[in-house]
Image: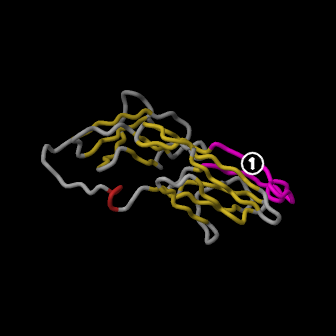
């Protein structure tokens, strides 16, 4: 499955079912089904993040597993460095460019297995972009004073959005959902794994 980034069509995530015993995969792609002249070689995982596409054409992909036929040692990163993905939140100056640039004010949260809720505090009026730290924009929008300020004792969410599907390979395991909860001076952005 290939998922193009709607904010920047030069980017795509390509994921596929792993093949038992494969040493790696050749991911071929192109703008015609029978002309897959570009390729990447991927070792040790069954996904590829690409930032090398043109924005206009549709692309076709093919993944081929390969093996040397020899036994090899492979570290299991889930055992050694854990499971997680990082999301980042940044306030943007005007203009239409949501962009992926990071500033000193960019905030990060590491998503962890078993944790269902994450909170970014101190959200004020302005243009905000929530993205995966490797690029894809999950949400970008303009928040007004009305969205972030409330005197209610139990304020309701003013902005909500379903961000992205979560998964393992091609199996969908959940959804990231975002909501803005206004406060007396600033709001909270709450990210929930459902």
At 73% from the left and 53% from the top, the residue drawn is 180
The residue lying furthest to the left in this view is 70
Between 153 and 3, the one lying in front of the other is 153
User: Residue 67 sits in which quadrant?
Assistant: top left
Q: Residue at x 76, y 59 (%)?
A: 126
The residue under the point 85% across, 57% down is 152
Q: Quadrant of the C terminus?
A: top right
Note whether 115 is above or below 41 in the view shown. Answer: below
Query: Which element type, helix, strand or loop, lies under badge 1?
Result: strand
Query: Farthest residue in the top direction?
Result: 34
Is residue 159 located in the magenta-colored stretch of the structure? yes
Q: Nearer the viewer, residue 153 or 141?
A: 153
- Quarter-of-image position of residue 47: top left
How many residues crowd around disc 1 within 10 Å: few (fewer than 14), some, or many (20 or more)?
some
Q: Which residues are magenta?
A: 138-162
In the image, is 148 to the left or to the right of 139? Answer: right
Q: Mark 1 sits on what residue?
A: 159
Residue 79: give x, y in percent of width and height: 33, 58
Q: Residue at x 57, y 48 (%)?
A: 193
Where's residue 172, x and y in %? 48, 38
């Amino acid at each position: 499955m290939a998922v193009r980034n709607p904010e920047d069509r030069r980017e795509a995530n390509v994921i596929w079912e792993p093949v038992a015993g494969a040493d790696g995969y050749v991911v071929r792609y192109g703008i015609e089904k029978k002309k897959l002249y570009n390729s990447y070689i991927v070792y040790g995982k069954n996904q590829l993040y690409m930032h090398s596409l043109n924005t206009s054409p549709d692309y076709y992909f093919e993944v081929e597993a390969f093996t040397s036929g020899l036994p090899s040692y492979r570290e299991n990163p889930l055992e050694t460095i854990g499971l997680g993905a990082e999301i980042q939140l940044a306030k943007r100056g005007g203009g239409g460019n949501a962009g992926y640039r990071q500033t000193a004010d960019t905030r990060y949260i590491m998503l962890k297995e078993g944790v269902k809720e994450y909170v970014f505090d101190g959200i004020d009026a302005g243009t905000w972009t929530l993205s995966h730290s490797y690029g894809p924009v999950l949400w970008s929008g303009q928040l007004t004073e009305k969205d972030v300020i409330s005197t209610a004792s139990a304020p309701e969410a003013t902005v909500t959005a379903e961000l992205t599907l979560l998964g393992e390979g091609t199996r969908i395991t959940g959804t990231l959902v975002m909501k803005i909860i206004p406060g007396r001076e600033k709001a909270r952005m709450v990210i929930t794994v459902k």
